[in-house]
Image: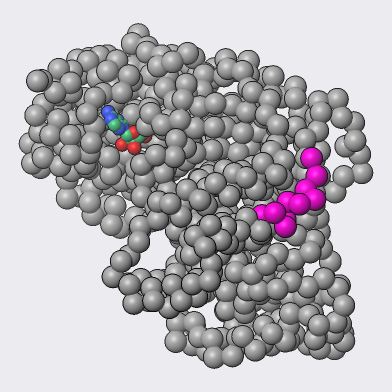
Amino acid sequence: MINPFSKLGISDDVVNAVKDLGFENPTPIQEQSIPVLLEGNNDFVGLAQTGTGKTAAFGLPLLELIDFKSNKPQALILCPTRELCLQITSDIKNFSKNISGANVVAVYGGANIMQQLREIRNGVQIVVATPGRMLDIIGRKAIDFSNVKFVVLDEADEMLNMGFQEDINDILSTTPDDKKTWLFSATMPPEVRRIAKNYMDQPVELTMGTKNTGNVNIEHEYYIVRARDKYAALKRIVDFNPEIFAVVFCKTKLDTQDVAEHLIKDGYNADALHGDLSQQQRDKVMQRFRDRNMQLLIATDVAARGIDVNNVTHVINYSLPDEIESYTHRSGRTGRAGKTGISICIVNSKEIGKIRQIERIIGKQFTKAELPTGFDVCEKQLFALVHKVHNVEVNENQIEQYMPRIMDEFAELSKDEVIKRFASLEFNRFLEYYKNAPDLNSSADDRGERGERGERGERSHRGSEGYTRLFINLGSVDDFTRGDLLSFVCNNGKISGKSIGKIDLKGVYSFFEVENATVESLFNNFKGVEFNNRGVRIEKTAESDGGGRSRGGSGGGRREGGSYGGGRREGGGERRSYSGGGGGRREGGNSSGGGGGFRDFSGRSREDRGGRREGGNDRKRRS
Ligand code: AMP
């Protein structure tokens, strides 16, 4: 049987390479564009969503059209972000792995330019670049584009959104007039039209799906809640979807950091991605997300651009984007590569109008969904646990030695009793948290929005009353983010994230607040704790000693038991998930629940990560 890619005109070397990647059939966009682009004599405009197989749609024809005997740049691919640049480069390297002499270089900011210049000097046929760094290299006269035959503008709308219009003009002016330009864009605002008009000659235009529509594999839902219940609603959605692997979008860096920190404190495996993080920190966060060592990525629009992670089950719009067009980009992070996905908006009653606007733009209707009740969540979690116990892979060799003792312990209990107790382990914790859980749904005509405490609602600002400020000899030079420091303190101090107040991350040291009642046990648990072979030191700061606020002991107020992620929930009740004696309870797989191997999303994975980092020596030592 002839391979379907061969039928489209792709040569054997490349067909074999894509076969190795598991591509059996072309995606619709590949089927439509490859034959057109292979002709090599047309300008081209492709309206296509991310995650539809766009890279191969232009990458495979490019490989057929380039002369790999020459070592001169013949194709330039411009894209908006470093992440996308690396992704495209890696894809094209994979597609061309059987072509001898094929060279692809990634040119992007925030990395060593000398290395990129060296690769260019050594000879490349395909340059994949972000506009800023490309201009820098052109300015140094370090590249010759006189042989460029093809320019690809990928995610053109995003490049324009990010203000790269002038850079693109300048770059294109250094390429020959007779080159062909291939433009891909998820949306077609007038600015992108203008590029097509100015730089292209009667382009062939293909629309994959309907113009400006979201991916057909994505379902759109919205929940109406009072603004003060947003955070609680987010947690309930997450709790109701035990397999969730999601990107949560916030409008500002501050909100992003804030929501991520609260989720971490509440025991969820989350982290923030925003522009205030260094490139290294962002890479680290993204790597964890890609490896599925993190379940919830809380991101700003800009930071999440170009994220290409498969099997994202949900996109959650914690706040709606200002620019409605951004909604398409946000929701396009799920439903990739033929998978299904759900894009959720958590809105208050005043924002329904915006939902209607988005519906008009994407040409799809949202479903109004009801937040599950506490009971629904408990039931869902219970059966997720039952399912997990049923499917767990037993390590016969390791468990064998303990079986006699385990059987001894359970000797008195019937099979029914044992099962009931195992199931109750998790179920009790959810029951306790959700037993008095309020109905968070708000109706469209609900006017009870006044006097609210801001987006995060139930976890509004907590002052320092009742907290002791502590010094710790770890900080950003140890490559800690605030989230890292929080889990380090929680894991080693064996306290709940809720006992921690403000965290003030400095360079070689940091400050953090802990509830007074927790200070003593924290000090005890930190005895002998080391980080990278260095003793970790915690001290009360002068103001907390002098202020006499630290009551210590078990004096008054609410108290909670157990260690972070391991113990029972406190009275006021945030859920501590991903715990249960340190065992992971999350698994991989996509929204359909099938396939993917089990992954550990437990609190333990954070500790493991810490261990690996230390072992891997990728943290700087304090001198
Ligand atoms: P892209 O839109 O190029 O970012 O591709 C989205 C995802 O789909 C990537 O993970 C690709 O590896 C994958 N992909 C692209 N084309 C195919 C294909 N023909 N068959 C299976 N997977 C594909």
Magenta stretch, residue numbers: 430-439
Is residue 352 toward the left or the right of residue 604 in the image? right
Is residue 464 toward the left or the right of residue 416 in the image? right
**What residue is rendered at 63% in x and 15% in y?**
360
Closer to us: 578 or 476: 578
* Residue 433 part of the magenta-drawn span: yes
Q: Position of residue 255 (x, y in %)?
A: 69, 49
Closer to us: 292 or 432: 432
Q: Quadrant of residue 12?
A: top left
Closer to us: 133 or 573: 573
Residue 55 shows up from this direction: no
Is residue 398 toward the left or the right of residue 8 in the image? right
Residue 467 shows up from this direction: yes
Closer to us: 584 or 406: 406
**What residue is rendered at 27% in x and 18% in y?**
31
**Residue 40, placed above or below residue 295:** above
**What residue is rendered at 81% in x and 33% in y?**
442
Q: Quadrant of ligand 1?
A: top left
